[in-house]
Amino acid sequence: MSLPLAPVKAHAHTIWYLTQGSAEMTIDNIPYSIEKKECLVVRAGQVFSIDYIDLHNSKGYMVTFHNDMAIGKTVKGKPSSGFDFLAVKGNPKISFDNNAAIYILTLLRRIDDDYVDNGLKHLTLIQSYFTTLLSEIEKSYTPLATVKKIKKN
């Protein structure tokens, strides 16, 4: 990989989760950095670029998926209606406490192991773990601060 990676429009949702190291990305012209036990969510339709990642010392997972993969918690095929962190205007950076980081890593490893060993043969199983993964991420999600409107008399 040659960095920085030029901006590209995401056609699917992508979750970047680091287990070691650091990375810097720009999502819709806003720069973000993440470290161990943090993730960045790039929603379908957003423009993003990878500005920096220590390729020698960084490890983690990149999970790319379309709406239909989150069917266990969707409403009319839109996972963003069940998971606030997938909303277009949501906060893309999510930090996890130690327990949540362990749960998320365990789920990512389980999904990866089954997929590597069996492909999509056990899609229902993978999908259930994936829905659980999204639910764990949702538990740690903090929305962007909302601006209160000042009432005029």
Image (cartoon, rainbow, N blue to C red):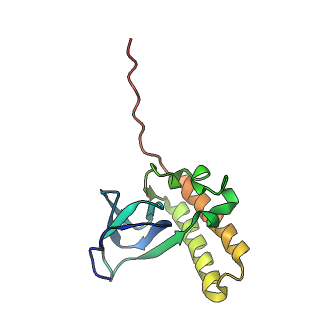
Q: In this view, does 18 lie to the left or right of 81?
A: left
Residue found at x 46% / y 68%: 17
Residue 47 vs 139, above or below: the answer is below
Residue found at x 35% / y 57%: 28
Measuring from the top left, give residue 72's x and y in whole percent: 69, 61
**Which quadrant is home to the N terminus?**
bottom left
Front residue of this view, candidates 35 and 23: 23
Query: Image quadrant of residue 39?
Result: bottom left
Measuring from the top left, give residue 86's x and y in whole percent: 52, 55
Q: Is residue 81 left or right of residue 125?
A: left
Front residue of this view, candidates 75 and 15: 75
Q: Which residue lies furthest to the top in this view?
A: 153
**Which quadrant is home to the C terminus?**
top left
Q: In this view, does 32 lie to the left or right of 70?
A: left
Query: Image quadrant of residue 152?
Result: top left
Front residue of this view, candidates 144 and 64: 64
Measuring from the top left, give residue 131's x and y in whole percent: 64, 63
Residue 51 vs 88, above or below: the answer is below
Measuring from the top left, give residue 139's x and y in whole percent: 57, 53
Residue 18 vs 1, above or below: the answer is above
